[in-house]
Amino acid sequence: GRAKKIKRHRDNLSGPKRRGRKCRNERLRVEAILWVLRTGVGWRDLPRQFGPWSSVYSCFRSWSHSGLWQGLLRWMAREADNENLLIDSTAMRVHQHAAGPAGGQLAQAMGRSKASLSTKIHLACDALGYPLGFLLTGANVSDYDQCKPLLRAYLKPQAYAIMDKGYDSDAIRAYVNQLGGTAVIAVSNSRAI
């Protein structure tokens, strides 16, 4: 799975080697990090079965600063199944304690949505659903505006660009055709047929 890929390609990724005691179970450490990122809980709320939260957090910070996650994403993009390119986005609420970040909300990809302050992830995946790249914006930014950079970076000629109805427009379809791909976009209910 994911942990084996990370461990197998750790030596090829950028970043200095850590000094000090090695982690006894890197798979468990990776699963703990992914659990926190998937659920959105605070590091201190990590279940005990994953080990001490502070060890998991320091491992996450060290891997982030060393470029492990970016290197892993680049590696997955090189190994991608380019038959299809899937693009979609999701928004998530910003925690109330993060409402006044250093550098301002715009610098931290925060924006007002209908309900609250939120961040939106625009993600491009290959045919197998593995991530290729992403953009972070405030939740008030349209999906339509962010798909062009993802298409330009990851759409290969002869590939299908699969997107939901948030991307339904003649301009996006024409842009996919211009890049040599085929647009497969769900038709919006508001579109005149």
Image (spheres, grey):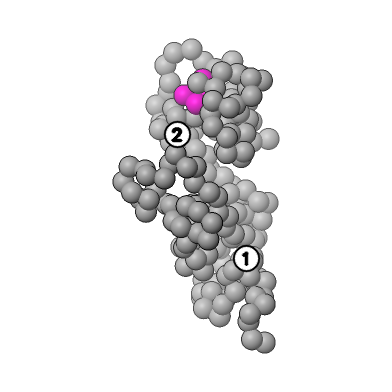
Give the residue displayed 45% in from the left and 34% down from the top: 64
Between 110 and 160, the one nearer to me in the picture: 110
Q: Quadrant of the C terminus?
A: bottom right
Instruction: Point out residue 89 in the picture as x, y percentages from the top left corner.
Output: 57, 57
Hey, which residue is sitting farthest left in the picture?
Answer: 103
Give the residue displayed 60% in from the left and 26% down from the top: 46
For badge 1, the amino acid type reads Met
Q: Is residue 27 left or right of residue 151?
A: right
Q: Is residue 124 visible?
A: no
Q: Is residue 140 left or right of residue 36?
A: left
Give the residue displayed 56% in from the left and 67% down from the top: 157
Instruction: Point out residue 124 in the picture as x, y percentages from the top left corner.
Output: 56, 56
Residue bearing the label numbered 2: 64
Residues at marks 1 and 2, CA–CA distance in whole angstroms: 30 Å
Q: Which mark is residue 48?
A: none
Between 168 and 124, the one nearer to me in the picture: 168
Q: Quadrant of the N terminus?
A: top right
Instruction: Point out residue 17 in the picture as x, y percentages from the top left corner.
Output: 43, 23
Instruction: Point out residue 171 in the picture as x, y percentages from the top left corner.
Output: 51, 78
Residue bearing the label numbered 1: 163
